[in-house]
Amino acid sequence: MRIRWRSPIRGPWLTSVLGLVLLCTIPVVVVTGLLDWIAYGPGQAIPADVGLLHLPRFDWPTRPAWLFRLTQGLHVGLGIVLVPVVLAKLWSVIPKLFTALPRNPLKAAERVTLVLLVGGILFEIVTGLLNIQYDYVFGFSFYAAHYTGAWVFLAAFVLHVALTFPVMVRGLRSRSLRTELRTPLAATRSEPAGELVAPEPDPPTTSRRGALALVGGGSLLLAGLTVGQHLDGPLRATALLLPRGRTLPGDFPVNRTFAASGIAEAAIGPEWRLDLGPLQLTRAELAALPQHTAALPIACVEGWSTQQTWTGVRLRDLAGLAGVPTPREARVTSVEEGPFARATLTSGQVLHPDSLLALQVNGAALSRDHGFPARVIVPALPGVHCTKWVRTIGFRA
């Protein structure tokens, strides 16, 4: 049975408007995602072995302190907000996916890029949303698949834009946006016959301005339910659909709780010591060293972030105690076991005046969930590398 697409508002103009929105916003999502991969640092990027898809290496800057909070917030937040636009764009071009491949080579190439584009962006959205929820039902490595899928989508996106940009420009010029926004349902008519236009359209059930309002309203709703993940204050309570968005008063989100870590109570008890190589320090001895306080954000790959006030010993002071006043790097390990229980910090990250081995947050001792007895906090560092329950720090000259 042949499917008949009969919506009277489907056509080049509406498709072009939605395409223009995605053309202006998707590059931001892609670039911030690739920057976040770089932010993890040489040898620590996730996924690590990406072959020819490896990006240029450079030391991720520590200034401004909110840099990773911005890039990751844009990547996840804007990606969620664009979901209604992506679905509307897919609805607008879906007739093309059910027609025979054109004989014209350029049109055939455009159709192939469209299939890769649709498949790629749906794959990235679904896996990204499942990762936010820690729901890995797909059974493969999210990091490797999401990163590789991003490059497949990016290649299709670039080729598709190159092939269809003139068509989009013609579509945008075919009708006036101002006129369409003033056209009510009763005056809504189908576009002139052409690609994507229904040959025998049904009576309209919504106007083009109604369709744009529905898409825009959906994006605004998702923005309202997501922005609390990235901002502190009263808006934190609006993150209703996302985990780690709403916390108890005076607390802030965590990805991994102490109970989930599997750490034995004794490992962070009175016998705990910070191992610096040449010497070991108790928590009381760390607290007796000169303390520094800094307001720093912590941001995680799932998109949530928060800024808190941390107090502890500067990492550069600990490097001096260890006999390596100008370290090339520092290797941090946690009491916890697992792939995220260690991190390597660059020289710039160690020597930044606000980089801390934190003992307190917001004037109180760290809770177990937030890394007691001590955790690393470094400006602009991805949250997974702000190691909790620190056991050793090895400074290397």
Image: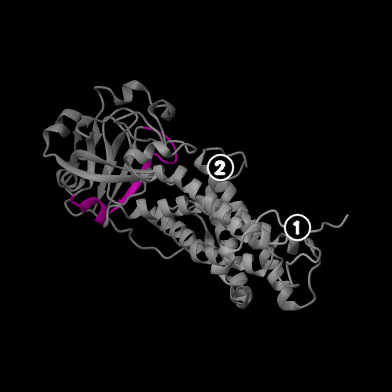
Q: Quadrant of residue 267?
A: top left
In this view, which residue lies farthest toward the front? 186
Q: Residue at x 39, y 55 (%)?
A: 71
Q: Circle 2 — which element?
A: helix
Closer to the N terminus: mark 1 or mark 2?
2
Q: Nearer the viewer, residue 277 or 20?
A: 20
The reply to whether the C-beta atoms of the residues labelled 1 and 2 are less than 8 Å apart is no
Q: Residue 189, how many percent across, how many down? A: 70, 65
Q: Amino acid at mark 2?
A: Leu
Work out which quarter of the rendered image holds the N terminus and state it: bottom right
Q: Is residue 276 visible?
A: no
- Tell which of 146 and 320 is nearer to you: 146
Magenta range is: 336-353
| Image position, residue 128 (x, y; %) | 54, 48
Frontmost of labels 1 and 2 is 1
Q: Give the left or right position of residue 204, taking residue 261 as reference.
A: right
Neighbour class for label 1 at 10 Å: few (<14), some, many (≥20)? some
Front position in the image: 256 or 75: 75
Q: Which mark is residue 114?
A: none
Residue shown at the point (45%, 64%) measured from the top left: 55
Three-letter code, disc 1: Pro
The C terminus, quarter of image: bottom left
Residue at label 2? Answer: 130
Element on which disc 1 rests: loop
Q: Does 349 lie within the magenta span?
A: yes
Residue 338 vertical position relative to residue 111 in the rendered view, above or below: above
- Give the CA separation, mark 1 to mark 2: 38 Å
Q: Vertical placement of 213 versus 286: above or below? A: below
Residue 223 in the image, given as x and y percentages of width and height: 46, 48
Residue 203 numbered mark, or none: 1
Report the residue that reaches farthest toward the right: 1
Q: Does residue 120 show up magenta in the picture?
A: no
